[in-house]
Amino acid sequence: MAFIKLNQNYNIKYFRFVQELSINKLEFYYHLYVYYKSMKTNTFNKSLKNEILIIALLFVVALLMRITYLNQVSSSPLFENPVMDEKYHIELVEQIKTDNEPKEPYFRAPLYPYFLTALSKATNGSFYTMRLLQIVLGSLLPVLIYLLGVKLFQKKVALIAASLSTIYPTFLYYDASLLITFLITLLSVIILWALYKYKPQSYLSPIAVGLLLGVAGLARPNILLLGLFLFVWVLIILKEQIGFKKALIHYAIIGIVAVVVIIPTTIRNYQVSGDPVFIAWQGGINFYIGNNHQSSGWSATLPGIDKSWEGGYTESISLAEKEMGRKLQRSEVSDYWYSKTFEDISEHPSSFVKLLVKKVRLLINGYETPNNQNIYLSKEYSSLFNIMIFNSPLYFPFGLLLPLALVGIFFSYSQWKKFLPAYLFLAAYSSSLVLFFVCARFRQPIIPLLLLFAVFALFKTIDLYREKNYKILAIGSILFLALLFESNHDILQLNQQRVKAEDYHMIGNAYLEQNNLRIAEREYIKSVKVDPTFARGFNNLGLIQGRNGKHIQAQLNFKRAIALDPNVVESYVNYATTEIVQGKFSEAIVILLDAQQRFPLDDNVLLKLGMTYYQAGNLDLAIQAIQKSIQLNPQNNQAKITLQQIKESK
């Protein structure tokens, strides 16, 4: 009877009663067995009910928090007028819906645009409903963190970390943003959970991991680096469980399945262009952005190239083709930028090393480094978000989370084999960021693990204190304090006046998209008041004045914008436009020729120049300019239509 714990009077009385009624020992043991099975089943059912309750509560709380944030932030003008990458995704969605995608390989990984297209079709293009459906999926993240945490740590660690994730501010922010960030974060946690549920005796496990890795690669290709890092796990963990040969077979299955998932994208790329790009061709450009000697390590701009998304895209192609002296396939454009990066590194090796160190520091820094929008801008529209995130005196929450999590990793090292998949994921994903460039939204997929390790660090600290293990406790404390300082160090040294000016400028652009010129002008005035050196603010202020017929005022602001920053091409084009409106074609041509000299790869400057030549009556020069524009950007349909109209008018 040792297998039954009789610790209650009820149990003792029950067994005495059964023993008295039993004819023999065999019948008595049968009754014991029946009772044991019923007790075990009841315990299992109770445990299962508790798990379901926890999962349901985590999901509901996460959803309620996200809906609250969504409703509050919907008052932002950027909500219905996406900018930057959100705008790019919406434009892609419209192209996909109308079967009007460019006949070229994917520039960026295609999973999210197609996912967003499905949401758009289901919601009739409602930005609110699209975001709402996203946050329903995003609300599964705390559940996944809990399930992963139960495999890694004690249940209380898993529950606290998962509970924190229901209110973690950047999860709320990106779940409601039209960006890939929320989806790759979900996929990353699912991959980790699959690794910890791995059954070495079944070939279904490597198939599942390969499938998930392939899908994640279609979302963000840099996660495929995890596939290489998993070889360490295969050699150390799987080899012990199933032998070296079978472990290699499992690893091969993971890789093959991942490739099978991705290969239809490669086939599509080849079919539309004859260019067998594996997933997307932006890798070379991003590699140069993050590793040239002028790189900031975080800003997604190329030195000497238009900082706008559209301008940067076309000019990065035009510059590569100009230097190679021929038309390039998109994979060749990517190869050109990879090659140019390695040349730059060989010429400036010390700059490259310093940049790598800086990117590691950016990765662990608590400031939410912008790449698309300033995340702190949402504080103005959401009271919930406002109390959850701040950048003084600490960069909260990441500036506290990261130090705690790294201490937790240090404390967990005694069980390193158990935590090896988690370590490998953190190492692989972090390395993939440092190899390119680092900003806040790119590091989101590591935050679920950081939450788990951070909570573990707190519990482990209490245990070490009770055990009087002061040596390890002291090392952990020193590590925490050092990381706390580093994570809250102002490494970017951003001009806060410029940051505010850019925020006002972005809001002004959103109102301009709505054709609300009065409020847009108000925001642009704010931008130049807070930072009188902000050229783009003066440019857009002049744009509004020009539309209102105040051409003299507009010209003064365009001249000021050019004087403050001669590298903003729009200022030249807008300045020329005010001259054209007044019938001063010769003056406009002089301005545009200056712009052409400064921006030789800008197809829109040449198009504007050609149109101005046409208005001035010089058809031959107009045709020459527009033909050059089309050479720089064969996808400029407006230039093609204008050229045809000019030729027909001769």
Image: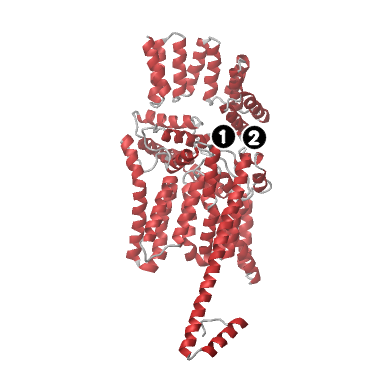
**Residue 217 pos. (x, y %):** 42, 48
Q: Residue at x 46, y 46 (%)?
A: 435
Image-quadrant location for residue 103: top left
Which amino acid, mark 2? Lys
Label 2 SS: helix
Could you tell me which quadrant the C terminus lies in?
Answer: top left
Q: Residue at x 65, y 37 (%)?
A: 496
Q: Residues within 10 Å of mark 1 (few under 14, many from 20)?
A: some
Above or below: residue 241 compared with residue 65: below
Circle 2 sits on which residue?
500
Front residue of this view, candidates 95 and 83: 95
Q: Marks 1 and 2, Cα distance to the nearest angstrom?
A: 21 Å
Above or below: residue 417 compared with residue 253: below
Label 1 SS: helix
Image-quadrant location for residue 331: top left
Circle 1 sits on which residue?
80
Question: Which of the two discs, 1 and 2, labels the residue nearer the N terminus?
Answer: 1
